[in-house]
Image (spheres, helix red, strand yellow):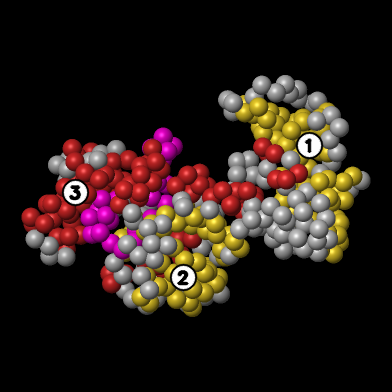
Amino acid sequence: MAQIRVESLRKSFDQFAAVQGSNFTIDDGAFFAMLGPSGCGKTTTLRMIAGLELPTEGKILLDNEDVTFQRASARDIAFVFQLFALYPHMNVAENIGFPLKCQGMARRDIYQRVQETAKLLRIEHLLSNKTSKLSGGDRQRVALGRAMVRRPKAFLMDEPLGALDAEFRHLMCSELRDLHDRIGATTVYVTHDQLEAMSMADRIAVMNEGRVEQIGLPQEIYDRPASMFVADFIGSPPMNFLRFEAGLRSGDRTISFHDTSIAVPEIREDRASAGMALGVRPEHIRFADAAPVRGEVFGAEYLGTTQIVTVDTAHGRIAARLPSSAPVRIGERVGLEFRSERLALFDVASGLAIRTANEGSANHG
């Protein structure tokens, strides 16, 4: 396996910039997810790493070798697509072994490699079956096997679970991560599904409009989003934003929020009075009679052990995650209290997070 390094990578199609100056390193053996909405540039970036697209600018290094303008066939990388693209006239063993057959490998060696790969994927019992008779999950295993059998330096996966139903996706998330751990593969995984990325990846790059907004551990990205976009994209429900106009000074531990003060983590930079946003996750809110923010309960969504309660306030609709046992009545007037040490602050104009004492090591793109 190998390290992958991307330096100042850009891709333009006529006047449209699909990828704008991406920089990141994927460590040898890491599971790295590229996460973002449709059209953010994640698949274009993956295709450039694979050699299926050539960059407009920048550099791609695989195991410290510059492969920027090498053909895909020369990069020793395996690509797994969302659509399985299996050969229906071949059985499972023939599908898995086909790349080795194309390389001219001896039949005995192909047989041994296919058996080893099928054992890793737990599909030995399916080797003689036609792929058209398989379930969606088993077809995806065969597609993975065809990529794995070559033993490439890296695996690139473009929304490989997108064609599966919810139950299979959940199962395959666990199996993909388990497979990654067993073979120690360097894996780059593209998805628009935050649950897939958060549950499988060692590190995540969140992309938006061709730019990497933040790179970090799943917990870092959730707890310390580098921008309002990341805070809104990650989390279900996403982070709440409460807008206010006030200047900020380094060392402050409270902000002037409309006609009251709210405790926040210690501020680490000065900002002149301008449009700001206070960010709070739903699980960091509780009902309290004397709380400074008040509103009327609009609705409640029961989720088993918890419930999502939406409250209409003068600052907009706010979602709070409360225990399902907490009594809630539609139309009730309530106060909302925030966990001060878990709050975030953002500059609305730039969308970027303002540095505070709980910023930690969150990385901006």
Q: Quadrant of the N terminus?
A: bottom left
Q: Which mark is residue 6?
A: 2
Numbered mark located on residue 119 in the image: none
Q: Is residue 297 above or below residue 247?
A: above
Dot 1: few (<14), some (14–19), or many (≥20) neighbours within 10 Å? some
Q: Position of residue 31 (x, y in %)?
A: 42, 54
On the image, the x and y values in percent for residue 45 come to 46, 65
Tell me the magenta residue range: 144-170
Residue located 83% across and 38% down the image: 293
The residue that appears at 39% across and 41% down in the rendered structure is 174
Number of residues whose C-alpha sits closer than 10 Å to that of mark 2, classed few (under 14), some (14–19) or many (20 or more): many
Q: Amino acid at mark 3?
A: Glu
Q: Residue 116, which numbered label?
A: 3
Query: Which amino acid, by three-letter code, is at mark 2?
Result: Val
| Disc with the residue nearer the chain's start (1 vs 2) | 2
Q: Position of residue 192 (x, y in %)?
A: 50, 51
Element assignment for label 3? helix
**Structural crowding at the residue carrying mark 3, measured as other residues with C-alpha within 10 Å and reported as few (<14), some (14–19) or many (≥20):** some
